[in-house]
Amino acid sequence: MPDKLRVRFAPSPSGYLHTGGARTALFNYLWAKGQGGSFILRVEDTDEERSTEESMRAIISGLQWLGLDWDEGPDPGEFGASIGPHAPYYQSMRRPLHQQYMQRLWDEDKVFYCPATAEEMTGSDGIKLLFSPYRDISREEQQKRLADGQVMPVRFRCPRDVDVRWEDAVRGEVKISSNEVGDFVLFKGNGAPLYNFVVVCDDIDMQITNVLRGEDHISNTPKQILLHRALGQEPPMFGHVPLIVGMDRQRLSKRHGATAVDAYEEMGVLPEAMVNFLALIGWAPGDDREKMTLAELKTAFDPTRCTKSAGAFNQDKLKHYNELYIRELSADELTERLRPFVPPIWFEHRGEDYARRVFVLQQEKISYLTEMEQNTWYFFRDPLEEDSNEKNVAKFLTGNADAKKVLGEIHDAMESLSDEQWAEERLTLIVEAFVESSGLGRGKVMQPWRVALTGDSISPGFYDLVVTLGRDTVLRRVEEWLKKL
Ligand code: GLU
């Protein structure tokens, strides 16, 4: 056994990278990296009917997005290629190795071709038998049937009355009797190898020392331990993390919101927020820290601190983390992160600096990157009547007897300012003078202005808005309204 931790994430590429899978990948990554070990990605694509290239690409890009770089595994640059001393890391390409291990088990008489029909594998009570009535079939008989062309699965001859024990990294000692395991199938009649067999071959070959996975795999673990032993190996250390449930404690499903990680990427969740959020579903560092970077998580992760009961997926928490991480970005980082989420023309409209200034104005106000566009579009084009808020237009402009005066008098005073004088101090003097002379409250003065400038009554601070939009745009938009009032 290698002295450094070797940990793998072994997804079956039959769908997207789901939150549960992403969390398993993250825990494995943290476990390996926290101990200076290796994180290995192995694609379990033996089920040819269900595995798709699209799914594999989605899983690879999901892991890359989260920043969970693997030391060995598929080459992210070239689909189908692998990097690492145990290549290939696509299970479907590892058949010769699986065949070798099968040969060993056959030579040592630890497996048998099982001619039992489905009926023969069913007990009088209608329940499936665990042990085959043919487990003691002679090798001559098996060979004869094979020569006759009989199609038979290969079963593992499971030892009876053995306690299979392991020290689970999450649950502590687990013990299951081999009598509850039975003669499980390693190869189907058509020669296709099954999960429990190939996973053990590959874990041995890749020198995996630690296996951390969802507790839905717990019934597979005794089978795998028995196979490791049958192949003369000490099994790796196993750990089983509780599943993720929704806030209603039901198994996580579409009902609870998106289950695929890429949906969160598209929603404008930052990967560092997602990582932080996933890490704290069913695990805690043992102190009161909540906001933790990947680097901090690496040092803190310890599988024994995983909860024993299912962790809940609380989307409000994800939103909260995302807000925290968005607020922390520098203006440049924020702009870069937003680039895929806003129209490219925005950066050309008045240049990068202008876009950056606008984004910073709203940095504190968005929960997801996708919200930036709807919060700031009016910085990049004049609001037309149809994209203005009808109710507020009526309330503050068309149906407001003071509107003409509020817009007109302030406009005329502002017009006398040059571009250089167009700053908060001078603008404040103008607005305050009007507030004083008109006797109208500040809200009654500023709201018509906001609606005229943005199409709505919510916007950043009044002076931030007027200063950032700039003299020409402000005067133009107000003049348009003055013509209509
Ligand atoms: N391919 C299996 C899955 O996606 C891997 C389970 C394991 O980690 O052994 O569920």
Image (cartoon, rainbow, N blue to C red):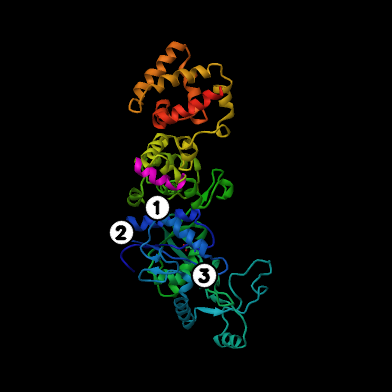
Which of marks 1 and 3 precedes in the sequence?
3
Q: Which residue type carries mark 1?
A: Thr
Q: Is residue 347 left or right of residue 385?
A: left
Q: Magenta stretch?
A: 331-342
Q: CA distance from mark 3 to mark 2?
A: 30 Å
Instruction: Give residue 304's mark.
Output: 1
Q: Is residue 167 above or below residue 129?
A: above
Q: CA distance from mark 3 to mark 1?
A: 32 Å
Of helix, strand and loop, which one carries label 2?
loop
Q: Nearer the viewer, mark 3 or mark 1?
A: 3
Which of marks 2 and 3 precedes in the sequence?
2
- Crowding at dot 2, Cα within 10 Å, few <14 / some 14-19 / many 20+, comes out as few
Between 145 and 61, which is closer to the camera in this rendering?
61
- Crowding at dot 3, Cα within 10 Å, few <14 / some 14-19 / many 20+, comes out as many
Q: Are marks 2 and 1 in contact (CB under 8 Å)?
A: no
Ligand 1 within 8 angstroms of badge 2 C-beta: no
Q: Which residue type carries mark 3?
A: Thr
Q: Are marks 3 and 1 in contact (CB under 8 Å)?
A: no
In the rendered image, is residue 450 in sight? no
Q: Is residue 377 above or below residue 102?
A: above
Which of marks 1 and 2 precedes in the sequence?
2
* Residue at the spot of label 3: 46
